[in-house]
């Protein structure tokens, strides 16, 4: 049996899926009837409400060699299970949860990216995602800065707005400097990657810079808000929680930095 990508299914052993909770690792066998996926699991966006999943996974050929592939997996197939939505500290509007695969059979024509194209597709996907993360969290950093600036103008301490105090002025300017640096980098990366094969190293630089800046600026904003910042009355507490998650979202910043360095060294 031959897939649309010209791969003989009897020479192919896809998805390698691992223990529960891991994304895209383990084992599967291909046969005339389809691809047999063994015990698998992963944490996915919209897991509780999605009707299909794009599964990026390792694959094993009949000769024992390994690669990767992407499958479009309908989530109503027999053997697919779902956990409850993850109860997160931040980004709570983003539905996430676990998906479990228990001997799920996926036909070969559900493979949308074959092993020969997997590396390129994975890099493009990561580059696009990281560029988007850079854009979003440069905006999150800016929102934290603007909230702190407005509050510093309004909050009266010692008979005058706290923005007139030297220490607050210094903190406000440092926040502004970091935000504008992150925005400028992300704008350049977005323009660089528009309409062409995305530059992964640049995208990683944007994501790491913007998310780190969002967290640092939100933390500095907390200092300006003082005790008021820990209440639900002001949105800075939500921004702080959302920004913290971003540093492990779409790849934790430390691992992404190593990947970016490897790209530069290649």
Image (tube, rainbow, N blue to C red):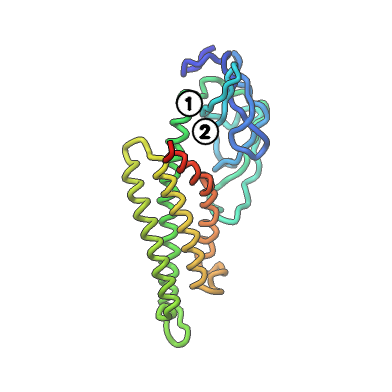
Could you say whether the residue bearing mark 1 is in a helix, strand or loop?
A: strand
Question: On residue 54, which mark appears?
Answer: 2
Q: Pointer 1: residues within 10 angstroms few (<14), some, or many (20+)?
A: some
Q: Quadrant of the C terminus?
A: top left
Instruction: For marks 2 and 1, give the CA distance.
Output: 9 Å
Q: Where does residue 74 sit, x and y in percent of width and height?
A: 56, 30
Work out whether 80 lies above or below 116.
Answer: below
Q: Where does residue 115 sit, x and y in percent of width and height?
A: 50, 24
Looking at the image, is mark 2 or mark 1 earlier in the sequence?
Answer: 2
Work out whether 139 lies above or below 110.
Answer: below
Q: Residue furthest front?
A: 265
- Rendering quarter of residue 264: top left
For the residues bearing labels 2 and 1, Cβ distance under 8 angstroms: yes
Question: On residue 93, which mark appears?
Answer: none
Q: Where does residue 245 sit, x and y in percent of width and height?
A: 55, 53
**Which residue is at a point 52% across and 52% down the rendered structure image?**
247
Q: Pointer 2: residues within 10 angstroms few (<14), some, or many (20+)?
A: some
Left or right placement of residue 151 versus residue 232 in this view: left
Left or right placement of residue 224 versus residue 176 in this view: right
Q: Where does residue 83 sit, x and y in percent of width and height?
A: 66, 41
Work out whether 100 lies above or below 86.
Answer: above
Q: Residue furthest bottom?
A: 159
What residue did someone put label 1 on? Answer: 112
Is residue 61 visible in this depiction of the protein?
yes
Q: Nearer the viewer, residue 20 or 120?
A: 120
**Which residue is at a point 46% across and 63% down the rendered structure image?**
217
Q: Quadrant of the N terminus?
A: top right
**Which residue is at a point 50% across and 44% down the rendered structure image?**
258
Q: Nearer the viewer, residue 171 or 72?
A: 171
């Amino acid at each position: 049996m031959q897939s649309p990508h010209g791969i003989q299914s009897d020479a192919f052993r896809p998805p390698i899926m691992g223990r529960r909770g891991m994304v895209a690792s383990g084992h599967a066998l291909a046969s005339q009837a389809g691809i047999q996926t063994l015990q698998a699991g992963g944490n996915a966006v919209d897991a509780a409400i999605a009707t299909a999943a794009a599964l990026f996974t390792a694959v094993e050929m009949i000769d024992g060699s390994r690669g990767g592939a992407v499958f479009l997996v309908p989530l109503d197939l027999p053997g697919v299970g779902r956990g409850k939505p993850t109860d997160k500290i931040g980004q709570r509007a983003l539905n996430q949860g676990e998906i479990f695969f228990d001997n799920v059979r996926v036909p070969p024509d559900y493979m949308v990216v074959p092993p020969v194209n997997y590396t390129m597709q994975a890099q493009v996907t990561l580059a696009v995602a990281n560029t988007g993360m850079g854009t979003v969290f440069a905006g999150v950093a800016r929102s934290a800065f603007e909230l702190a600036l407005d509050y510093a103008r309004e909050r009266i301490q010692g008979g005058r707005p706290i923005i007139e105090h030297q220490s607050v002025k210094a903190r406000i300017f440092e926040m502004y400097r970091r935000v504008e640096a992150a925005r400028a980098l992300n704008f350049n990366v977005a323009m660089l990657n528009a309409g062409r094969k995305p530059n992964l190293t640049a995208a990683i630089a944007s994501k790491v810079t913007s998310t780190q800046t969002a967290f640092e600026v939100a933390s500095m904003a907390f200092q300006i808000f003082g005790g008021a910042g820990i209440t639900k009355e002001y949105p800075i507490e939500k921004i702080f929680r959302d920004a913290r998650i971003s540093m492990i979202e779409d790849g934790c910043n430390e691992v992404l930095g190593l990947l970016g360095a490897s790209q530069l060294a290649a």
